[in-house]
Image: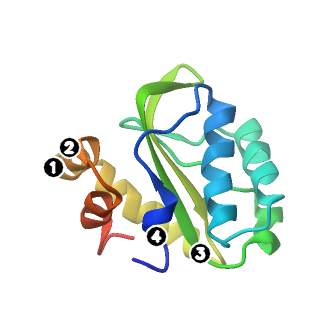
Amino acid sequence: MSDVLSPQSIVLGGEARTRDEAITEAGLLLVAGGAVDESYVDAMHEREASVSTFMGNGLAIPHGTNEAKSLIRRTAISFLRYDQPIDWNGSPARFVVGIAGAGDDHLTVLQALAGAFTDDAALAALESARTPDDVLAVLVGRV
């Protein structure tokens, strides 16, 4: 888990107020963690323009286009929780998980996140998490 999600890539009080700001916030965490080139953030916005990455249960999972795979240095995710839900094309997103999946890793990451966000106990634990380590405790073994 520590090689995919680090405590530094977890923010429990995201500052974004719009979908586009949230995508940028998630992407910049991936950049800061050394997982992607900065231009990957633009590819995350491109992906969102073509298809919504809102998944339900308050979760959005912005990620880059297939053409941006070369901008990924290693598989990683960023995790943001917002006190006030972000309006994601009419749906409320409280959690935004940025994904950079090298090769086909994004499919494994998506499957693991889906498992966490359809598990009521895991979702409740993510909603009440007070520290990055609390988030890691929920997601360890899943991602």
Q: What x and y, as percent, mark residue 129?
A: 26, 48
Dot 2 lies on which element? helix
2 relative to 93, above or below: below
Q: What is the spatial separation of the Cα atoms under label 2 and label 3, in whole angstroms?
A: 26 Å
* Colouring scheme, one of rainbow, by chain, secondary structure, one colour: rainbow
Determine which residue is flagged by label 3.
75
Q: Looking at the rendering, which quadrant does residue 17 occupy?
A: top right
Numbered disc in front, either 4 or 3: 4
Residue in view at x 28 percent, y 48 percent: 126
Q: Is residue 16 left or right of residue 24?
A: left
Determine which residue is flagged by label 2.
124
Residue kind at label 1, given as amino acid type: Ala
| Residue lying furthest top | 90
Numbered disc in front, either 4 or 2: 4
| Residue 2 appears in the picture as rendered | yes
Q: What is the spatial separation of the Cα atoms under label 4 and label 3, in whole angstroms?
A: 12 Å
Residue kind at label 2, given as amino acid type: Ala
Determine which residue is flagged by label 4.
6
**Do callouts 2 and 3 mark residues in contact (Cβ within 8 Å)?**
no
Residue 108, numbered circle: none
**Do callouts 1 and 3 mark residues in contact (Cβ within 8 Å)?**
no
Numbered disc in front, either 4 or 1: 4
